[in-house]
Every structure is written in C-alpha cells, then in structure tokens.
Amino acid sequence: MRHILSAAAAAIVCLMSAPAVAWSPDPAPQVQVVDSDIALFWSAYDAVRAEADPVRQRDLFQRMYIDQGTPGLAAFMEAKAYTVDTYLEAIRAYPAYWDTVRPRTALAGQALDRLEVHLARLRELYPDLRPAGVYFEVGALRSAGTTQGDKVLIGVEMATGDASVDLSQMPPNLKRFFTTYFASGPLENLDLLATHEVVHTQQKGDRQSLLAQVVYEGVADFVAEKATGRLPKLPYVTYGPANDAAIKAAFRADMNGEDFSGWLYNGANNRFGTADLGYYVGYAIASDYYDRAPDKAAAIKAMLELDYADQAAVQAFVDASAYLDAS
C-alpha cells in the first residue's frame, strides 16, 4: 500500500524504503509512504509455515523478510533486539495469533489521514520540529511502537489488534496483557501512538534514572495530547488521577533509582495493580510545568529540548513543575 502525504505533512513525516535524505523546508516535497515490510513478512510467514525443517525455515525467513526489508525493519530489529530466532519462536508458539491478526495488519494505513493533521498541529506547537521517518513493521510481539534516532517504528502485529485476535495459545501473563491492550482500541489510536513516537524523535539524551525516563514518556504523552486532543485509552490515564497522592508518595521513594520495572513497560503485577503508572507521573509533571509557565510556546520548546542525560536539568524541570513537592 502506498500513500502520498500532502506537502504540509511531508516536511514532517516520511516513511521510505531508502535511507533518509537531507531535508529542505522550502519547498516541501511530496513523500511516498511505504509499508512494504508488512507484505514481505507475510510472504516469509507463509513460507515458514509450509516448511518443516527448522534450518530451512531460518534461511527462508532471513532471505525473504530480513534481507529484503527497509531501513525501518533493520532499525526495529536493533531497537527491540529481534533476531531470526526471535521471530521463528513467536511464529511457532502462537500460530493462532498470527493467523487472526493477519488481516488487521493491512488496516494500519487508515491512520495516516489523521496523522497528517496531527503533525501539522505539532509543527504549529513546535516550529523547529525535525523530520522523522515513520515505518510500519511486523515485529515479534515486543513493541507496538518505538523509535530509533529519527525513525518512528510501529509494530503492526500489536498496534492493529483487537478482541478478534486469538490469544488462546499464549501463557496467562501475555493473555492478560494483550486483552487489556486490545481493549484500548490500538488501531483506532494508531495516529495517537505515531504522534507520541514522533515526539520521541525530537527528544535527546540517554535516561539513566527513573525520574528522567518518566519525564521523557510523560512529555511525549502531553505533547501528543496537545496535537491530537486526546490521551490513550489505557488504565493509567484514569487510575492515575484517582490515586494521585498514593502514586506520588510511592514514586518519590523510587525516582532516583535506575529500576524502571515498577513504573514503566510492565504489566499489572506491581504495587498498584495497574501498568505503566510512570507515564501518568511524567504526564502530570509535564502538565503542571505547562500550566505554571507564563509562555506556553516556550514551555513546549523547553520540554522538547530538555537534555535527559543532564540529571540537573531534568531535576530543574521537575522542580519548576512543582508536581512532586511535598504537600
């Protein structure tokens, strides 16, 4: 499936099968949006499922998917530590999942019209927005969306799922995770996810502390909300405000550590029984910072240009928000 973005959005987002090229804001070129890795994956999938020999399966998948993939596929595999064996293990373990999610992966492109509008709004909020490539990929059930450098990488085998996808072959923990995630309507919110990830491509600096990581994620949620007008339909969005005092107290005790597991990228198996509450904390910090700032445009700029490797700068940002101040 190929799409052409309008000039207004093309300067911001490009999904291409060739390496990124130098960007010139005037005139803004039309850019092809290519999701060709999806078709490559399913061709390789069919070949693997028709072959009984594991060695032959490995060779087929390498040649038919990985070797022919776009730079986005290479980046996705590096970002999520995917290998040929990672894919083959997932294919062998959950064939019912793959067979039922397959028709839904063709629907990913429907988010592009909305994404175009959001990115135009994002550029209004932050005129210095740098271009980012957006790639639709098929991963191995580790990520619905991530970034690497200037690339937004969407895992369509997760991001297009819904209640029709067969989870029966999964262990209980994965079944619970996917049931909750699919209930959030990921396909309907794919434009929001992509906008969130585009925000990440603007951010800089490695995050060494939990505090820096939650601010990084919370800023992406907050700025994406400003661009799209909504937040994801995930439990932390409603659970957080209703339990703010307890969450804040618990987070203060952990925030300077390097263990993210209780707060980010987790399931509901934590002290609150709700996944990813670090996103809520980071969002609340960003929101309070914005509310307190006299110059809203400058506040957005400060968020997107914060150096997350500079712990003092991160702490100053948090202090300016006053969200974590003891009450």
Image: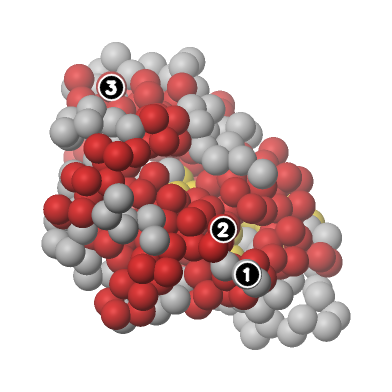
User: Which numbered circle lies on residue 175?
Assistant: 3
- Disc 3 marks a residue whose amino acid type is Lys
Tag 2, which secondary structure?
helix
The residue depicted at 33 percent of the width and 19 percent of the height is: 167
- Locate residue 43, reporting x and y percent: 48, 40
Up-down relation of residue 139 to residue 119 (above or below): above
Q: Look at discs 3 and 1 and give the one toward the viewer.
A: 1
The local crowd at label 3, few if under 14, some if 14 to 19, many if 20 or more residues have their Cα within 10 Å, is some
Residue 312's disc number = none
Residue type beneath disc 1: Pro
Q: Position of residue 193 (x, y in %)?
A: 53, 46
The alpha-carbon separation of the residues under discs 3 and 2 comes to 39 Å
Position of 112 with respect to 151 (left or right) is: right
Counting the numbered discs, the total is 3
Q: Nearer the viewer, residue 165 or 215?
A: 215
Label pair 1/2, CB-CB below 8 angstroms: no
**Callout 1: SS:** loop
Give the alpha-carbon distance from disc 3 to disc 1, as whole Å. 46 Å
Q: Position of residue 245 (x, y in %)?
A: 30, 39
Q: Nearer the viewer, residue 138 or 146?
A: 146
Residue carrying label 1:
294
Query: Could you say which is closer to the camera, residue 142 or residue 62?
Result: 142
Say left or right for 267 vs 30: left
Relative vertical location of residue 16 with respect to residue 250 in this rendering, above or below: below
Secondary structure under tag 3 reads helix
Residue found at x 42% / y 69%: 320
Residue 204 screen position, x and y as percent: 42, 76
The single residue placed furthest to the front in the displayed view is 327
Asked if one can make out residue 48 in the rendered structure from this viewpoint, the answer is no
Question: In the image, is residue 287 above or below residue 272?
Answer: below
Residue 261 seen in this snapshot = yes
